Image (cartoon, rainbow, N blue to C red):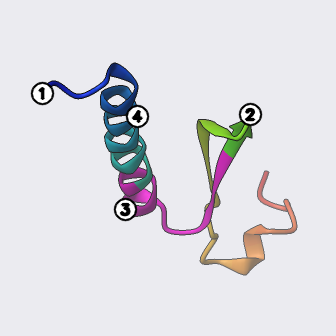
Amino acid sequence: MAKAPAARSRNNWGDELEQVLQEALRTIKFGSVTLIIQDGRIIQVDKSEKVRLRKPEFIDGGGI
């Protein structure tokens, strides 16, 4: 007996979401990963990464 198309597409979507989330979490060092939800479904994944400066003397902008 074949699976219903809805069940198949939901499974594929879950696989895609899992891959996207794993990649985002694997590659981010500092920042956030945000899930965008519309009508109870995740439609987008945003990744915002922060860059930490190691030398605090450059933070005041005096070298720019």
Distance Cα–Cα, label 3 vs label 2 = 25 Å
**Residue positioned 64% across, 77% down in the render:** 55
4 or 2: mark nearer the eye: 4
Secondary structure beneath label 1: loop
User: Residue at label 1?
Assistant: 1
Question: Badge 4 local density, few (<14 within 10 Å), some, or many (20+)?
Answer: few
Find the magenta span and give its range. 22-35
Residue at which label 4 appears: 10
Query: Residue type at mark 1?
Result: Met
Q: Quadrant of residue 10?
A: top left
How would you rate the neighbour count of disc 1 (Cα within 10 Å): few for under 14, some for 14-19, many for 20 or more?
Answer: few
Residue that badge 3 annotates? 26
Residue 1 is left or right of residue 55, and the answer is: left
Type of amino acid at the residue the image marks with label 3 = Arg
Query: Distance from label 3 to label 4 (Cα)?
Result: 24 Å
Q: Position of residue 50 (x, y in %)?
A: 64, 60
Residue 31 occupies quadrant: bottom right
Q: Earlier in the sequence, mark 3 or mark 2?
A: 3
Tag on residue 38?
Answer: 2
The kind of secondary structure element at disc 2 is strand
x, y percentage for residue 37? 71, 40
| Residue type (three-letter) at the residue carrying disc 4 | Arg
In front of the other: 37 or 60: 37
Above or below — where is 1 with respect to 14?
above
- Most distant residue in the left direction: 1
Q: Is residue 41 left or right of residue 64?
A: left
Q: Specify which label sits upstream in the sequence, 3 or 4.
A: 4
Q: Residue placed at 66% from the left, 52% from the top?
A: 34
Give the residue at x 42% y 43%.
Answer: 17
Q: Are marks 4 and 2 in contact (CB under 8 Å)?
A: no
